[in-house]
Amino acid sequence: MKVYSKKQIYNGDKITIEREGITSVDLMERAATEVFNWMHSRMQGAQVPIHVFCGIGNNGGDGLVLARHLVNHGYNVKVYVVNCSDRRSKDFLVNYERLKQTSKNWPALLKCASDFPEIYPDDIIVDAIFGIGLNRPVDVWISSLFRHFRNSKAFTLSIDIPSGLFIDAIPQDDNNVVWANYTLSFQSPKLVFFLPQTAKFTQQWEVLDVGWDADYLQSTETEAQLISKFEVLPLYKPRDKFAHKGNFGHTLIIGGSYGKIGAVNLSARSSLATGAGMVTVYVPKCGYIPIQTNFPEAMVITDVDDDVITDIKYDLKPSAIGIGMGLGTNEATILALESFLKNQNSPIVMDADALNIVSKKRGLIKLIPELSILTPHPKELERLVGVWKDDFDKISKVKLFSKKHSLIIVIKGFNTMTVLKDKLYINTTGNPGLATAGTGDVLTGIISALISQGYEPLDAAAFGVYLHGKSADIKVQTYGYQSLIASNVIEGIADAFLDLFTQPEVPVENDTDNV
């Protein structure tokens, strides 16, 4: 699913209007009618008090259309106009007149805090005050209105985007934004739904298809894309029945130091569980017995040193390499990594201490092969790209780093993002159970295995992140957030693959008189 920018959203509306020969009022009617249909199919005429708060722009116009349909279908509706300016949009005025012709109860005008209506916890608030065009902080009294919503504890439904939330910037004050329980976003989700600093403003969201021009939807390239099952399923490589292990590559996992052999064990196990034909682990001598006894399917090569890696030498031709897990930052290890990077020509996967080393010794970054995949946790990312002031700045810095070095960066988080140059791929799987030691090592193994099997690096990163999160989503149902551990995520990889081919249950829709 594409995630459109503000400019692309405006263009989508404009082109749809031009090519279909309709007016902006017609498109507003279409979009807001979808909101009504969504509500009506769930409420079935229930007489819950619905408070529709409308701004004076096009988002407010959507609210007025919705209110008219709710009135026509007998709902208990109260409509308010948030009078933040003397300027009304044309489409707002058209729908204001239509609502006045429909209902004897005209919208109440709100101009200050003393005008705020009573709202009870069992009521419903529809937020149609500001849309994506907002470009400045809201007035103080409107901020008070937003707090009034929140204090009421009523269910709050935002149309398109929570009011006060910018589509391309972080709000300076959380009180200047509506905290929505649910947001119905037109045609596409907004990037701010997925950022740590702004995702809190809507607990859930859903996209409503408002019928944009099909050619525009198909041809428009977006910087951001949502990655779900439907995006990764076409990437899946089916297996030929005559295939053998040699067809699925040989993954080399390099890392470990005294006390940290578990990290490479997790990476190696996840690599084999993701489909690599063979896995070899390169560890210091102290890792030989742990790997051989805990993971008999792996082959092991040991360094000359007992405790740390000092000289990376092997006589195999790996299909993919994952390096850094538990590696340590010993001086001899730094020299070994430098020597290793000088001899690499194909993309590799770098994690943990491999990233800490190149962050400390910046000259090594230029030795990393193009399209290599870096999987830093937040602190490792900060060491790589520098301190950021907010989430948008973080994405900007990562894009700049990716473009400069032609590298793929995985920004780990609830909605993990894979970045290649100006492109951003937002994952839809995963949960807080992944916030535990070793799950990053598992991810490195998964991505390395996919590269071993012939997946292109970008596809391997996006697909690997998806599988990693889906495995956690499946296993958390058994273990819960607190008790999920990295080994459980490895166990769930098989289920994550099988889930790709599971058809979702189709809910039985009740017949309703939707518009």
Image (cartoon, helix red, strand yellow):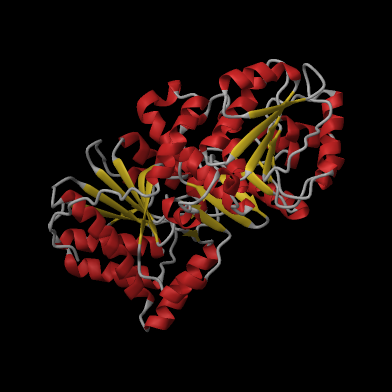
- Seen from the viewer's position, the closer of residues 317 and 192 is 317
Residue 202 visible (yes or no): no
Residue appearing at x 70%, y 47% in the figure? 372
Asked if residue 18 shows in the view, the reply is: yes
Q: Quadrant of residue 116?
A: top left
Q: Nearer the viewer, residue 369 or 184?
A: 369
To which quarter of the image does residue 105 belong? Answer: bottom left
Residue 92: where, in percent of width, then height?
Answer: 35, 68
Q: Is residue 185 above or below residue 320?
A: below
- Identified at 43% across, 59% down, the residue is 188
Q: Position of residue 391 (x, y in %)?
A: 61, 44
* Residue 400 in the image: above or below residue 365: below
440 sits to left or right of 159: right
With 192 as the anchor, is 307 left or right in this view?
Answer: right
User: Which residue is pictured at 55% across the width and 33% down the height?
Assistant: 270
In this rendering, the count of numbered labels is 0
Q: Considering only vertical position in the picture, is 422 above or below 272?
A: below
Above or below for 280 versus 35: above
